[in-house]
Image: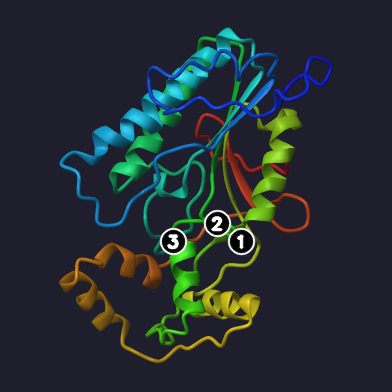
């Protein structure tokens, strides 16, 4: 977000190239008061590189640190970092995730996100720039990529899916609600130096999510019953174990406070588990 009084015509979009420890952010950060950092190397199914963590660190950690340090030098007041609920873990069992939970990242992508969070907190401790960390779950909506896009594609193709017997619960957040949250995080003084876990009010099962996707694109939801235990076995045999676990397992976020009329959020300051309306 630039200072409105200093913003010049045709200065809204600037190309910086690859994001890593050498990226020059000087021009894009000119007259900027708030940075919302969403760019990252996303988690990749069936990663083939020899050392995926090193590649994730180059973009998600070193690239974030480079941006944050130059943001401090440029006088940026607030740095909003979109992390991931995967920092907390892959699944919940007895209790939903909260912002005060001990992090439990399970793959290189999640590890890199946690390392970026910790680096940002350290930068905040030695500067006047405020840090806001947001850990969303699966984001759904028009134009969303990743797992949601892959699932939507299967529904659109009319492929029968063996998920009718799944009775899980997963927290999600719509693109619209995530944008609403980010808009509030720009100006809300109570979220400075906080970690936010956010989601929509309603948690959905995988079959419920598929039915909603089908309804939104005017297609039938072709679901049939199949034992989830056998799905797990088939996933392991085909190298799709992690993908199947995400479709079968629970991932819920504990949300007591609400943002506007829809999203829910939990907030932690220095991991004290405090929950506050924002």
Spatial separation of the CA atoms under disc 1 and disc 2: 6 Å
Spatial separation of the CA atoms under disc 3 and disc 2: 9 Å
Numbered disc 2: secondary structure: loop
**Counting other residues with Cα less than 10 Å from the Cα at mark 3, is it few (<14), some (14-19), or many (20 or more)?**
some
Numbered disc 1: secondary structure: loop
How many numbered badges does the structure rendering display?
A: 3
For the N terminus, give its image quadrant.
top right
Nearer to me, 156 or 224: 156
Where residue 133 sits: x, y (%)? Answer: 55, 35
| Picture layout, residue 160 above or below residue 176 | below
Q: Is residue 180 visible?
A: yes
| Picture layout, residue 113 above or below residue 142 | above
The residue pinned by badge 3 equals 147
Q: Residue at 81%, 21% (x, y): give it.
A: 4
Q: Is residue 256 visible?
A: no
| Picture layout, residue 232 above or below residue 30 | below
Where residue 153 sits: x, y (%)? Answer: 47, 71
The residue pinned by badge 2 equals 144
The residue pinned by badge 1 equals 141
Residues under numbered marks 3 and 2 in contact, where contact means CB atoms less than 8 Å apart: no
Spatial separation of the CA atoms under disc 1 and disc 3: 12 Å
Q: Residue at 48%, 88% (x, y): give it.
A: 222
Where residue 128 sits: x, y (%)? Answer: 61, 11
């Amino acid at each position: 977000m630039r200072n409105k009084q200093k913003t010049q015509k045709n200065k809204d979009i600037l190309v910086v190239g690859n994001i890593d420890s050498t990226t020059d952010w000087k021009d894009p950060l000119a007259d900027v008061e708030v940075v919302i950092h969403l760019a990252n190397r996303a988690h990749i199914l069936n990663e083939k590189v020899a050392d995926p963590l090193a590649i994730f660190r180059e973009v998600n950690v070193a690239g974030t640190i480079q941006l944050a340090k130059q943001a401090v030098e440029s006088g940026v007041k607030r740095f909003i970092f979109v992390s991931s609920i995967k920092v907390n873990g892959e699944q919940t069992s007895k209790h939903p995730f909260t912002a005060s939970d001990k992090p439990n990242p399970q793959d290189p992508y999640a590890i890199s996100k946690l390392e970026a969070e910790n680096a940002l907190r350290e930068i905040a401790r030695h500067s006047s720039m405020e840090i806001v960390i947001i850990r969303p779950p699966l984001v759904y909506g028009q134009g969303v990529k990743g797992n949601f896009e892959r699932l939507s594609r299967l529904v659109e193709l009319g492929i029968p899916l063996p998920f009718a017997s799944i009775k899980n619960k997963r927290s999600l957040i719509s693109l619209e609600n995530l944008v609403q949250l980010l808009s509030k995080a720009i100006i809300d003084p109570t979220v400075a130096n906080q970690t936010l876990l956010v989601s929509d009010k309603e948690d959905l099962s995988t079959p419920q999510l598929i039915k909603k996707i089908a309804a939104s694109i005017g297609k039938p939801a072709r679901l049939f019953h199949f034992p989830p235990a056998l799905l797990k076995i088939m996933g392991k045999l085909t190298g799709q174990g992690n993908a199947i676990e995400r479709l079968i397992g629970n991932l819920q976020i504990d949300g007591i406070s609400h943002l506007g009329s829809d999203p829910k959020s939990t907030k932690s300051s220095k991991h004290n588990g405090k929950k506050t309306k924002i």
